[in-house]
Image (cartoon, grey):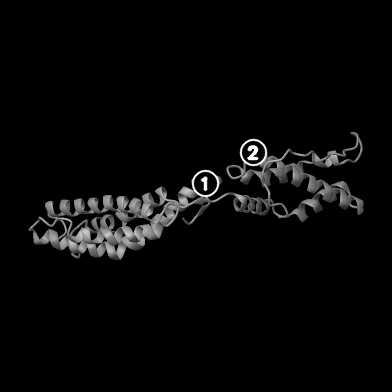
Amino acid sequence: MERTDLSPRPVADPCPNAPPAGQTSAGSVCSDPRIEDYLDQVCAPLIGWVPYAARMELRAELQAHLVSRVAAYQELGSSPDAAVREALAQSGDPQAVAREWVREWERVLPRRKAPPAWYSTLVALGCFAVATRLGFGLIAAAEASGGPDGLLHVGQLGYPLFFAALAILLPMLAGLTTGALLRARFAQAVLAALVMLIPWAIYGLPSTGDPDIKSNLAGFAVLQGAFWIPIGCVSAALGGWLRGRCEPASKRRVMPA
C-alpha cells in the first residue's frame, strides 16, 4: 500500500467531477451496485479493527481509485459494463485487500509495553498454585475413598479420569487463565512458576506421616514435570491468543519491556 498514515482525514468526494444526470458519468459509476458490493466486502472485515472515520476515508479513496480505473478502461474503448468488470478484476480479491489494510493499520498503531517478567511470573505462580492445591485435594480425596494406590497404579476403575484431571485438565485450566491475564511471556512465566511449584508438590504436606500420601505427592511432582510444563505453556499461549482475538486492535500490539 502506498499510504502509511491512516489517521482520519476529511473524506473527499470520490466523484468530484460528475457530469449532469443522463450522461455517462463518474457519478453513475460510483453508484454501480457491483462497486458498492466490492467496497462493502472490503470494509466489513475492518469493523472492530479500524475506527469508523478511517474506514470511511479508506472506502472513499478506494472508490475514487475504482472510478478512475473504470474511466481509463472506457477511454480505451471498453463499454461501461465491461470497464467496471475489468476495474474490479484488476483491484483483486476484496478479502485480500481488507487483510492488507488491517496489517497496515496494525503496523502504524503504537505498541504498548509488556509487563515485567516478575509480574508475569507472579500471575502464573498464582494460577498454578491454585491448580497444585486442587491436585493435592484430588489426591487426598482418592486416598480417603480407597482410590488409586499411588499415581502409577492403573488397575482401579475410574483411574483414567482421575489421571486426566490431575495431569491434563488442571494444567490446561491454569494455563488458559494465565494466558488470559497476561499479554506476553506466557511460556516463560509458566515455566518459572512450575520450577518453583514442583518442590512444593514434593514437600506440600511435610507434617503427614502417611507413606502412601508422600508417595503420591512424589508422583504428582513427576506428573507436573512431565505433563504440566508442556501443557501449561501451550495452554497459556492459547489463552493469550484468545484474549488477543477478543480485544480491540488498538490493544493487541505489545512490545517487550
Q: Give whichever of 122, 244 is nearer the camera.
A: 122
94 left or right of 129 in image? right
> Within 10 Å of the Cα at label 1, are there few (<14), some (14-19), or many (20+) other Cα atoms?
few
Q: Nearer the viewer, residue 1 or 43?
A: 1
Q: Which residue is mark 2?
A: 52
* Mark count: 2
Q: Residue furthest top?
A: 21
Distance (Cα) linking label 1 and label 2: 17 Å
Asked whether disc 1 touches disc 2, contact meaning CB atoms under 8 Å apart, the reply is: no
Q: Secondary structure at mark 2?
A: helix
Percent across and percent down for residue 141 are: 16, 51
Label 1 sits on a secondary structure element that is: helix
Residue nearer the viewer, 96 or 175: 175
- x 77%, y 51%: residue: 88
Task: Answer yes or no: is residue 155 visible.
Answer: no
Whichever of labels 1 and 2 marks the residue nearer the N terminus, that label is: 2
| Left or right of 55 in this view: 18 | right
Q: Residue 207 falls in which quadrant of the image?
A: bottom left
Amino acid at circle 1:
Lys
Report whether residue 116 is seen.
yes
Q: Position of residue 222 (x, y in %)?
A: 24, 65
Q: Estimate how packed mark 2 is, as few (under 14), some (14 to 19) or many (20 or more) residues with alpha carbons within 10 Å.
A: some
Q: Nearest the camera: 149 or 191?
A: 191
Label annotation for residue 251: 1
Q: Residue at x 40, y 48 (%)?
A: 181
Can you give x and y, in whole percent of width and height, for residue 40 in the image? 69, 43
Residue pictured at 67% horizontal, 44% vertical: 7
Q: Which mark is residue 189?
A: none
Which quadrant is the N terminus positioned in?
Answer: bottom right
